[in-house]
């Protein structure tokens, strides 16, 4: 039968996103900024306790929302749970972005902002981090005059590791009276800085969170949006009734109640970030300052051969040669053993 499916123009113009996340099992995975130590035992125990009856029922959100709101230091009405951090970003397109309207981002950054904009048929205005990966504050304030529907700022930024300070963010918020400002705090735990307390002052501020990084629950897909209750009420209108599954709720509640495992991982990641950065610099690798659980590095001319060697040894890192330069890569701060494996390969140049 011949049919003519009425596909939207924005969809016809794009390709399917092929997640580069397949076939990674058993390798040293420093390519996705995951918590490579695994989730807490408390989260795993909570999953084991789930009954068949619970799996058979639609989830209830009130009690877990209360616990998770407490964890973030907000009221339940100021927190909305989503199906992963990616979905905590998608909701802004459903709420604020009309086809052919525009959003603002600073590149290089997390690709999902552009990805969702393309699906929505929206235009993307771009400011650029400097060659030293510094945040382009003046350009952003200027671009806000054009009233983008949403400004997405990953803070700290992926892949640069750049952290924008409080003064700059307040300047942005004041310049954005007609823009939803989304601070994507996927990595904020590793920076020790959050914009959460500012939601009470700025109705245009939305904070996106994920349980995929510090909490080590990427496989369960849980994210969150935090904002002033009236602002968040608008976003709620764009949400399905059951966006988050019962396994993600149980495990996340157990993980934040226990919380010591998360805190230990954050502490250890900060320590290893400093140590690994120093070790790389000692080997003449250019290392950009990072506030996340990863480092952006430039191996220069040695990059391409090194990337091939790492791959042959089953060590995955995120090459950024196509967009940033031939020797650029983003490396997740894994365990000390995993990072030592990278250094060993680096020390055996040419072999
Ligand atoms: C900046 C940033 N935001 C959001 C996410 C989304 O994470 P997830 O969908 O796993 O919650 C990521 C994941 O890498 C990220 O780097």
Image (cartoon, rainbow, N blue to C red):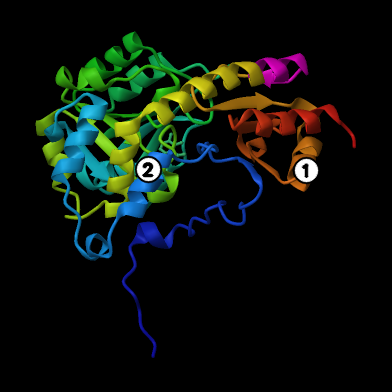
Residue 272 rendering spot, x and y as whole percentages? 59, 21
Residue 127 rendering spot, x and y as whole percentages? 44, 26
Question: How far apart are the alpha carbons under marks 2 and 1?
Answer: 36 Å
Neighbour tally class for label 2: few under 14, some 14-19, many 20 plus, Cα within 10 Å: many
The residue at which mark 1 appears reads as 308
Secondary structure, mark 2, is helix
Of all residues, the one furthest to the left in this rendering is 230
Q: Nearer the viewer, mark 2 or mark 1?
A: 2
279 is within the stretch colored magenta: yes
Image quadrant containing the N terminus: bottom left
Which numbered circle lies on residue 71? none
Q: Is residue 105 above or below residue 89?
A: above
Task: Tell me if 166 is positioned left or right of 261 in this view.
Answer: left
Residue at the spot 27% in from the left edge and 13% down from the top edge: 170
265 is within the stretch colored magenta: no
Residue at the spot 36% in from the left edge and 53% down from the top edge: 48
Task: Tell me if 291 is positioned left or right of 241 in this view.
Answer: right
Residue at the spot 23% in from the left edge and 15% down from the top edge: 174
Magenta region: which residues?
277-286
The residue at which mark 2 appears reads as 43
Does the beta carbon of the residue at mark 1 sit less than 8 Å from ligand 1?
Answer: no
The quadrant of the rendered image in which ligand 1 is seen is top left
The prevailing secondary structure element of the residues shown in magenta is helix
Neighbour tally class for label 1: few under 14, some 14-19, many 20 plus, Cα within 10 Å: few
Secondary structure, mark 1, is helix
Residue 87 rendering spot, x and y as whole percentages? 32, 46
Residue 131 visible in rendering: no
Circle nearer the N terminus (2, 1): 2
Relative depth, front residue between 26 and 260: 260
């Amino acid at each position: 039968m011949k049919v003519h499916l009425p596909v939207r123009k924005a969809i016809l113009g794009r390709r399917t996103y092929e997640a580069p996340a397949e076939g990674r099992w058993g390798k040293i995975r420093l390519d996705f900024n995951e918590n490579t130590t695994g989730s807490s035992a408390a989260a795993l125990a909570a999953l084991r306790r789930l009954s068949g009856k619970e799996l058979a029922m639609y989830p209830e959100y009130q009690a877990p929302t209360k616990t998770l709101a407490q964890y973030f230091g907000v009221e339940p009405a100021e927190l909305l749970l989503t199906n992963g951090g990616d979905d905590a970003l998608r909701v802004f397109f459903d709420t604020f972005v009309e086809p052919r309207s525009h959003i603002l981002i600073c590149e290089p950054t997390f690709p999902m902002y552009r990805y969702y904009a393309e699906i929505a048929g929206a235009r993307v205005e771009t400011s650029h981090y400097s060659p030293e990966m510094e945040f382009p504050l003046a350009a952003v304030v200027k671009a806000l005059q054009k009233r983008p529907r949403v400004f997405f700022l990953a803070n700290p930024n992926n892949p640069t590791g750049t952290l924008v300070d409080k003064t700059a963010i307040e300047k942005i918020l004041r310049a954005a009276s007609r823009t939803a400002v989304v601070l994507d705090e996927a990595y904020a735990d590793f920076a020790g800085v959050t914009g959460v307390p500012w939601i009470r002052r700025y109705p245009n501020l939305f904070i996106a969170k994920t349980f995929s990084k510090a909490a080590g629950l990427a496989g369960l897909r849980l994210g969150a949006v935090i904002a002033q209750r009236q602002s968040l009420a608008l976003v709620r209108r764009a949400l399905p009734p059951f966006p988050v599954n019962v396994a993600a709720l149980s495990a996340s509640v157990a993980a934040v109640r226990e919380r010591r495992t998360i805190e230990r991982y954050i502490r250890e990641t900060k320590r290893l970030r400093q140590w690994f950065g120093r070790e790389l610099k000692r080997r003449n690798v250019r290392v950009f300052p990072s506030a996340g659980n990863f480092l952006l590095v430039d191996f220069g001319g040695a990059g391409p051969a090194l990337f091939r060697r790492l791959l042959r040894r089953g060590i995955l890192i995120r090459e950024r040669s196509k967009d940033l330069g031939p020797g650029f890569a983003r490396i997740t701060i894994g365990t000390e053993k995993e990072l030592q494996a990278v250094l060993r390969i680096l020390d055996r140049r040419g072999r």
